[in-house]
Structure formats: structure tokens, C-alpha cells
Image (cartoon, rainbow, N blue to C red):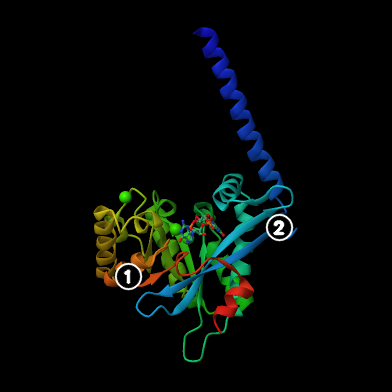
């Protein structure tokens, strides 16, 4: 048993080494990837549920590695966050998203679409976020209300007071703030009263099951009612079926996105949807 244990340990530690090594590699390769043109943004359309009007898009980062091909954002965003690379990458993403959105013209009569940009916890804590946002808006000419910032529950947890001040400051400048992946954190609904946000995005793990799991439907319905009672807007993400969309509409959900409505697209292709 001792021998096996020892071998086990050796195997485990070699596997660990490899994982660490891979992260170090990725970190090294991610450095300068933006400048080398390996990173790009795609835009997933967001629709108003009541009439399925196209009202905006969420910017999602893509990394096409020259040898390894596409690397999942869940992997490289984490590397960027842990290594601190996000401090340069975050503002680059924000600047590019604002520049793209500034070019989007709306159909006659309709307001121009917004762009929603994901912010990582570290960007929130970096201190210069309001200045970065103001700079991106100024350089692009994008009106503040067309920029939406998405932050996760966990990013604002812990130090709610300072997060609250920061979010209030951002909202005072006109940008909108969304709580992303809502329902997956530990804070839950009571938290919402203390965090000044414009709305919540219901996590796609709830939306995925609303047609067959009564608990997920009950939760989704409760989130919508609760957010509305606080004057907030609700976005559903991960809508993959018509039935999910119909149910969300019946429950009064405001906005929605997902593969059934539209896949993420390069900026020019998204612009073509605007007609
Ligand atoms: P997220 O913010 O929850 O983004 C939504 C994810 O769901 C995206 O995955 C999107 O492609 C995917 N998705 C959209 N519709 C559907 C659907 O109908 N079904 C399913 N199963 N999935 C759908 P993606 O692009 O792989 O991004 C993963 C996560 O990476 C994002 O989750 C976000 O947390 C992070 N991320 C992506 N881009 C950025 C960025 O520019 N900055 C930061 N900080 N994080 C980013
Ligand atoms: Ca998001
Ligand atoms: Ca989300
Ligand atoms: Ca479930």
C-alpha cells in the first residue's frame, strides 16, 4: 500500500506539474496576444422579449492560438485574471467594444443597440475603472447609456460598501451595470437590495431546465418578480429552445439571448443584422 501510495503521489505531483506548466505557458503566450491579433471580440445579439426586437449585444472574447487553435474563454480569462494580465487586456477589450458599438447604426426609429462588456473581479478592484470607462467612451464617442457592464455576484461580494460606491459612480456617468450569472452565487436575492445595479442576468443553468424542472422555473419566476419589484431589468441567457423563450415571455422577462435567438458573431456580421 505504501508503494502504491508513493506512486500515486508521484503521478499526482507530475500531473500537477503539467497543469502548472500549461498555465505558465498560456500566460506567456497570452502576453502580447492582443497586439499580435490573436484575440478578437464576437457579439451575441440580445433581444427584447416582448417583441423580439434586437436591442444590443454582449461582447465575448475569443483567442485563436496560432498552434493550439481556439482556447476557451473560461480557461484563458482565468489565466489573465490570476496573472494580472487582465489589467491590460480588460481596457483593450473595453476600448474595442466601445469602438465597434459606436459604429452600429440602428434602424429608423429604433434606439441604437447597446454593447455589454464582461468585467472580471480584478478589473473592479483595480481602482481606475471609472477613468478607463470614461476614456473608452470619450475616444469612441459612444453614448454612456449604450455601454453596459457585466459583473458577477462574486466580484461584488466581500466588500459591498466599496463595490457599491464604485457602481454608483459608474452609473452616475450614465453606463448601465448588470449582475451576471445571477442565482449561482451565495448571496442571493437579499444581496440585490444593497448592490446598486440596473438589472440581473439569470444564469443559463436555470434557463436550461425551466421546461422540465419545476424548481428552476419557480426560481426563475421568483428572480423576475423580485428584480421587477426593485425596479430592475431581467435578462435571460442561454435560451436554446422556443419553449424556453415562450415561458420567459409569459413570466415577464425583459431581455434574452441564447443560441435559439442568435449565436455570437464577428462585429461586421452583427452590424448586418441591424439592417
Ligand atoms: P458569460 O458572461 O456567462 O457568457 C455567456 C457564455 O454563454 C458565452 O460563452 C456564450 O458563448 C455562451 N452562450 C451563449 N448562448 C448560449 C446558449 O444558448 N447555450 C449555451 N450553452 N451557451 C451559450 P463564452 O464565450 O465561452 O464565455 C465564457 C465566459 O468567459 C463568459 O461567461 C465570461 O464569464 C467570460 N468572458 C468572455 N469574454 C470575456 C471578456 O471579454 N472579459 C471577461 N472578463 N470575461 C469574459
Ligand atoms: Ca456575461
Ligand atoms: Ca452569464
Ligand atoms: Ca435543475
Residue at 62% across / 72% down in the picture?
267
Residue furthest to the bottom in view is 108
Q: Percent from the top left, x then y, of residue 107?
A: 52, 87
Q: Is residue 194 above or below residue 233?
A: above
- Residue 91 lies, with reference to residue 138, above or below; the image says above
Note whether ligand 1 is within 8 Å of mark 2.
no
Q: Nearer the viewer, residue 195 or 188?
A: 188
Q: Which circle marks residue 6 in the picture?
A: none
Q: Is residue 214 above or below residue 252?
A: above
Q: Neighbour class for label 2 at 10 Å: few (<14), some, many (≥20)?
A: some
Q: Left or right of 219: which side holds 32?
A: right
- Give the mark nearer the N terminus: 2 vs 1: 2
Question: Label 2 vs label 1: CA separation?
Answer: 38 Å
- Decide: few, some or many residues near mark 1? Use Cα within 10 Å; few <14, some 14-19, many ≥20: few
Does any portion of residue 93 appear in the rendered image? yes
From the top left corner, tell me how far across and down residue 104 is, in percent.
Answer: 58, 80
Say which residue label 2 marks. Answer: 38
Q: Position of residue 180 (x, y in %)?
A: 42, 59
Using the image as rendered, state which of residue 255 and residue 152 is in the foreground: 255
Q: Secondary structure at mark 2?
A: loop
In the rendered image, residue 264, in percent from the top left (x then y), is placed at 55, 65
Vertical order, 22 against 254 (above or below): above
Q: Quadrant of residue 258?
A: bottom left
**Residue wearing tag 1:** 246
Amino acid at each position: 500500500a505504501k508503494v502504491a501510495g508513493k506512486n500515486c503521489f508521484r503521478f499526482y505531483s507530475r500531473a500537477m506539474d503539467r497543469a502548472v506548466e500549461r498555465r505558465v505557458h498560456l500566460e506567456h503566450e497570452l502576453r502580447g496576444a492582443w497586439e499580435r491579433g490573436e484575440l478578437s471580440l464576437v457579439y451575441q445579439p440580445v433581444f427584447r422579449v416582448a417583441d423580439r426586437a434586437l436591442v444590443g449585444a454582449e461582447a465575448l472574447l475569443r483567442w485563436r492560438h496560432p498552434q493550439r487553435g481556439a482556447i476557451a474563454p473560461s480557461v484563458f480569462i482565468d489565466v489573465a485574471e490570476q496573472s494580472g494580465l487582465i489589467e491590460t487586456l480588460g481596457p483593450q477589450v473595453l476600448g474595442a467594444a466601445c469602438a465597434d458599438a459606436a459604429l452600429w447604426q440602428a434602424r429608423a426609429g429604433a434606439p441604437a443597440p447597446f454593447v455589454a462588456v464582461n468585467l472580471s473581479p480584478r478589473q473592479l478592484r483595480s481602482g481606475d475603472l471609472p477613468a478607463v470607462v470614461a476614456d473608452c467612451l470619450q475616444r469612441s464617442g459612444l453614448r454612456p447609456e449604450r455601454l453596459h457592464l457585466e459583473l458577477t455576484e462574486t466580484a461584488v461580494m466581500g466588500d459591498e460598501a466599496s463595490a457599491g460606491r464604485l457602481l454608483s459612480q459608474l452609473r452616475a456617468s450614465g453606463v448601465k451595470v448588470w449582475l451576471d450569472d445571477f442565482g449561482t452565487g451565495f448571496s442571493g436575492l437579499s444581496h440585490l437590495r444593497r448592490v446598486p445595479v440596473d438589472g440581473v442576468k439569470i444564469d443559463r443553468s436555470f434557463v436550461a431546465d425551466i421546461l422540465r424542472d419545476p424548481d428552476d422555473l419557480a426560481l426563475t419566476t421568483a428572480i423576475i418578480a423580485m428584480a421587477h419589484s426593485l425596479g430592475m431589468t431581467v435578462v435571460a441567457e442561454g435560451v436554446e429552445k422556443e419553449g424556453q423563450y415562450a415561458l420567459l415571455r409569459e413570466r415577464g422577462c425583459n431581455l434574452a439571448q441564447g443560441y435559439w435567438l442568435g449565436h455570437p458573431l464577428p462585429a461586421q456580421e452583427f452590424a448586418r443584422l441591424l439592417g
